[in-house]
């Protein structure tokens, strides 16, 4: 019998396996999944690289690596994803929050700091609750209403609000777009709606197939949600309030034009870290 395989051996074997399946983040994923099996952080792996694994750990790790090889997203395997430095629970019924969406949150937080005073915010299509819960935690003076058509998303989002300590200030409502708000008005309406053109969905990374279609499919041209949200939010926002929406690559100009036509003022776009126009912010005049 040779020497038992160590942590670093398992990481190398798994990295090769995942890389052969076309996964660019093979090494990172192999490490994240092993750390998850051991219930440790990644630093632990480097400190204990020469230790063997228990047979039960080998079995659990092998199973996760096989699933990752089928292109199941890492976040669905570990059940969580970091957003704005907090761990959000996710499961296959909800979209995995993306780092790009932190730009929208940052922009709304900056606006709220400039404005001061109590705030009421609506997050349309809340998914895991990433935006709604983060805004509630970053803005202690805010109350947030979060909507979705997916019961599963609302259940996961409510769990995240509870776990992260925002449950008293985030209220969940079921229904399409702005309808569950029932004509109420807010200081800000925010949304990261589905915006991928239907035909493009098939061409994206294989991982996307595991995410809910209702979270991603923006209709034929990807803009269906904005046709409802951009004019609709103008009625749901108080004078002097704002709306902020995330948009897909190449959509910002069209969405900004929709906003101007609908009667919004001071329409501006915010770039993401890759230099792509990612968020459109609009203000309702005081009149
Ligand atoms: N806000 C989350 C985030 O940023 O990670 C999730 C965004 S995901 C791109 C879009 C969300 O909108 C999904 O949770 C989906 O269920 C929801 N959705 C889709 N159609 C909707 C509709 N007609 N009304 C309300 N929500 C909708
Ligand atoms: N940013 C997501 C992606 O490209 C899309 C999210 C959305 O449709 N709002 O995978």
Image (cartoon, helix red, strand yellow):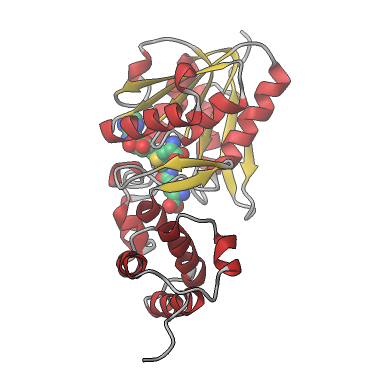
| Residue placed most toward the observer, 257 or 214 | 214
Looking at the picture, tell me which residue is in the foreground, 128 or 104: 128
The residue lying at 40 percent from left, 37 percent from top is 128
- The correct choice, above or below, for 34 with respect to 256 in the image is below
Q: How many marks?
A: 0
Give me the residue at 61% from left, 19% from top.
140
**Quadrant of image for the C terminus:** top right
Horizontal arrangement in the rendering, residue 252 relative to residue 163 (left or right) = right
Name the residue at the left extreme: 151
Visible residue check, residue 248: yes
Q: Give the image quadrant in which the ligand numbered 1 is located.
A: top left
Query: With 130 as the anchor, is 282 left or right in this view?
Result: right
**Which residue in the rendered view is the most extreme toward the bottom?**
1
Question: In the rendered image, is residue 223 in sight?
Answer: no
Q: Position of residue 244 (x, y in %)?
A: 55, 30
Which residue is at 70% across, 17% downward?
115
The spot of residue 257 in percent (x, y) is: 54, 35
* Location of residue 15 with respect to 149 vertically, above or below: below
Residue drawn at x 54%, y 48% as measured from the top left: 99
Q: x%, y% of residue 136?
A: 54, 24
Looking at the rendering, which quadrant does residue 14 occupy?
A: bottom left
Check the image and name the residue furthest to the right: 114
Look at the image and tell me in which quarter the N terminus lies.
bottom left
Residue 137, image x, y percentages: 57, 26
Figure check: 237 above or below 152: above
Which one is nearer the viewer's eye here, 89 or 23?
A: 89
């Amino acid at each position: 019998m040779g020497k038992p395989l160590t942590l670093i051996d398992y990481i190398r074997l798994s990295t090769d396996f995942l890389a052969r399946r076309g996964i660019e983040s093979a090494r990172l994923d192999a490490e994240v999944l092993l750390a998850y099996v051991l219930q440790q952080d990644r630093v632990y792996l480097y400190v204990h690289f020469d230790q063997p694994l228990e047979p039960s750990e080998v079995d659990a790790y092998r199973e996760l690596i096989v699933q990752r090889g089928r292109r199941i997203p890492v976040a669905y395997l570990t059940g969580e994803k970091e957003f704005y430095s907090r761990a959000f629970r996710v499961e296959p019924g909800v979209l995995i929050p993306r780092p790009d969406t932190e730009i929208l949150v940052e922009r709304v937080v900056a606006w709220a700091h400039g404005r001061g005073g109590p705030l009421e915010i609506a997050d349309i299509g809340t998914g895991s609750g990433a935006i709604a819960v983060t805004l509630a935690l970053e803005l202690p003076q805010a109350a947030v209403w979060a909507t979705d058509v997916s019961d599963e998303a609302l259940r996961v989002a409510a769990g995240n609000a509870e776990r992260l300590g925002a449950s008293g200030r985030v209220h969940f409502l079921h229904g399409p777009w702005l309808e569950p708000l029932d004509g109420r008005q807010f200081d800000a309406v925010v949304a990261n709606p589905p915006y991928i053109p239907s035909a493009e969905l098939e061409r994206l990374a294989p991982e996307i197939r595991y995410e809910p279609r209702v979270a991603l499919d923006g209709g034929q041209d990807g803009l269906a949600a904005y046709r409802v949200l951009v004019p609709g939010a103008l009625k749901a926002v108080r004078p002097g309030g704002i709306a902020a929406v995330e948009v897909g690559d190449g959509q910002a100009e069209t969405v900004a034009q929709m906003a101007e036509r609908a009667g919004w003022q001071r329409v501006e776009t915010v770039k993401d870290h890759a230099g792509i126009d990612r968020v459109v912010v609009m203000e309702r005049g005081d009149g």
